[in-house]
Image (cartoon, rainbow, N blue to C red):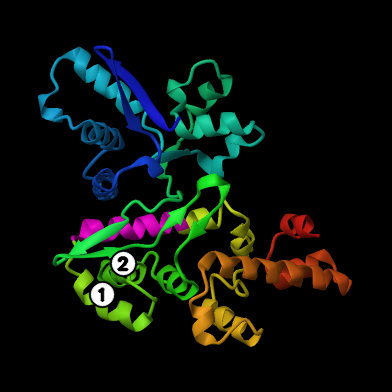
């Protein structure tokens, strides 16, 4: 469920239960607490309690009495969007289950699930919580530095259609910095929030100003972009671009700039034109070229195992293409 609905004295309240529904302040507060969880300073249970209190604007220190604390704990347990439950050997125990049951078991601890026989088995396994770092939303649409407002990239998934305002060069340079150290976060954020026509030089110069942002804000923006990147390559047709076990010839993981500039050689415009190409258009072209390459090798009577070796794609994807 996207929201957690509850009533108090005939008044209905809602708590967001999806990344996409968070306000910028709710999102930044949550990322700040996630950093504390990573450092061992906060438990997963208390993170959920803090989230509920932040959304409802409650002071947890003022919540007294067994019934009130029990209600708060119940609400916190309903918050399922932040983490997935991972079982041993890459969720081996969940294989063969229907999608709805799998999702339920990956979002709700097995000791809280009634009526599913497999839950009694799963509760004995050494499962753990992993961050659900995959969503498609721009949760910090703008930032303010020394009185100046910088608008970030836009993402829209309405009407089952994905659009994004990032340019190909902007995306490639930002993606290269995913997982970078804290010292490079200002550059990553500057790339994503460069005003007007994107320029590497302008972004680099702006990074010095962006270094004034609080580290929590920098990390929240970086995490948002990482989750959007994960969405692109797990929840859309672009998954084929990173599906290969062997990444050496993968145009997204290595040689991204070369792949971009090759489009100029293919007659799609001069260097400046292809740099400013929209990211969705760019990825669509790469996907089309990859599919055409697989079909061309098939027309040349290459065995599918050989096609898999040359492209790095698993056989099941090659079979789906052909």
Residue reaching furthest to the left: 62
Left or right: where does residue 54 sit relative to residue 320? left
Left or right: where does residue 271 sit relative to residue 221? right
Neighbours of disc 2 within 10 Å: few (<14), some (14-19), many (20+): many
Query: Which residue position is annotated with label 1?
Result: 207
Instruction: State whether the magenta stretch is mostly helix, strand or loop.
Output: helix
The reply to whether the C-beta atoms of the residues labelled 2 and 1 are less than 8 Å apart is yes
Left or right: where does residue 97 sit relative to residue 200? right
Residue 173 is situated, as x and y percent measured from the top left of the image, at 42, 74
Numbered circle sitting on residue 99: none
Q: Which residues are magenta?
A: 214-228
Which quarter shows the C terminus?
A: bottom right
Residue 92 falls in which quadrant of the image? top right
Where disc 2 sits, the SS reads helix
Query: Which residue position is annotated with label 2?
Result: 189
Q: Is 117 inside the magenta-drawn segment? A: no
Where disc 1 sits, the SS reads helix
Q: Which residue is rendered at x = 42% and y = 51% of the image?
A: 137
Residue 134 is situated, as x and y percent measured from the top left of the image, at 46, 49
């Amino acid at each position: 469920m996207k929201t957690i609905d509850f009533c108090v004295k005939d008044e209905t309240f809602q708590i967001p239960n999806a990344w996409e529904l968070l306000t910028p302040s709710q999102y930044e507060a949550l990322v700040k607490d996630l950093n504390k969880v990573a450092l061992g300073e906060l438990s997963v249970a208390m993170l959920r309690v803090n989230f509920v209190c932040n959304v409802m604007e409650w002071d947890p220190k003022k919540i007294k009495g067994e019934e009130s604390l029990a209600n708060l704990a119940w609400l916190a347990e309903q918050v399922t969007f932040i983490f997935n439950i991972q079982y041993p050997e890459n969720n081996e125990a969940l294989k063969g289950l229907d999608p709805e049951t799998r999702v339920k078991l990956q979002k709700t601890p097995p000791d809280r699930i009634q009526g599913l026989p497999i839950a009694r088995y799963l509760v004995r396994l050494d499962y753990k919580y992993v961050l659900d770092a995959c969503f498609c939303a721009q949760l910090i649409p703008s930032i303010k530095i020394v009185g100046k407002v910088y608008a970030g990239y836009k993402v829209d998934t309405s009407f089952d259609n994905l659009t994004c305002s990032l340019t190909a060069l902007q995306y490639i340079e930002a993606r290269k910095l995913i997982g970078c150290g804290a010292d490079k976060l200002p550059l990553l954020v500057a790339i994503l929030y460069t005003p007007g026509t994107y320029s590497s030089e302008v972004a680099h110069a702006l990074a010095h100003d962006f270094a004034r942002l609080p580290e929590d804000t920098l990390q929240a923006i970086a995490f948002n972009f990482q989750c959007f990147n994960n969405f692109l390559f797990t929840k859309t047709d672009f998954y084929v671009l990173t599906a290969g076990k062997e990444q050496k010839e993968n145009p997204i993981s290595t040689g991204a700039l070369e792949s971009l500039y090759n489009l100029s050689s293919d007659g799609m415009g001069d260097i400046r034109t292809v740099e400013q190409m929209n990211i969705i258009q760019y990825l669509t072209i790469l996907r089309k070229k990859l599919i055409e390459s697989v079909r061309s090798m098939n027309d040349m009577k290459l065995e599918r195992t050989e096609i898999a070796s040359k492209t790095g794609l698993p056989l099941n994807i090659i079979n789906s293409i052909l």
